[in-house]
Image (cartoon, grey):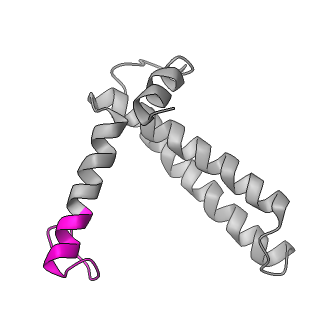
Amino acid sequence: MTLDEYQQQSRKTALYPQVGSNVTYPTLGLAGETGEVAEQIKKMLRDDGGVMTPQRREAVKKELGDVMWYIAQISSELGFSLEDVAWTNLQKLFSRLERGVLGGSGNDR
């Protein structure tokens, strides 16, 4: 499955207010789901002695899927394909790598 195929299929499950003109809802959902990924890692430290158990690993995978769903919906709301978003990100990162500014801070490095 390509990223764009995922985006198209996931869009069929987008049932939130004003789908097609509401970037706010999926953006807030993304914030919540990234917190749930972090929560699973916290529980790994608290409950699993810092060991990534197979069960915890699967829980993280499910939460990452939710993060991916929200990224797909934000991209759709803004008229971006996921493949274009991914490619744009790689171009930015490789440009930074070539210029020796991959590490550090600042968006425009």
Residue 77 at x, y = what percent? Answer: 34, 28
- Left or right relative to 70: residue 84: left
Q: Is residue 23 visible?
A: no
Residue at horizontal 76 percent and vertical 77 percent from the top: 45
Q: Quadrant of the C terminus?
A: bottom left
Residue 46 at x, y = what percent? Answer: 81, 76
Query: Relative to 107, does residue 102 appear above or below in the rendering?
Result: below
Give the camera-side residue of 35 and 65. 65
- Left or right relative to 98: residue 21: right
- Return the residue found at the far front: 1
Residue at horizontal 37 percent and vertical 26 percent from the top: 22
Residue at horizontal 26 percent and vertical 65 percent from the top: 93
- Left or right relative to 12: residue 51: right
Q: How many numbered badges does the structure rendering display?
A: 0
Residue at horizontal 49 percent and vertical 38 percent from the top: 70
Give the camera-side residue of 17 and 99. 99
Query: Relative to 99, does residue 8 appear above or below in the rendering?
Result: above
Q: Is residue 11 visible?
A: yes
Query: Relative to 89, does residue 98 appear above or below in the rendering?
Result: below
Magenta stretch encompasses residue 4: no
Residue 48 at x, y = what percent? Answer: 85, 74
Magenta stretch encompasses residue 103: yes
Please give the range of residues in magenta: 93-109
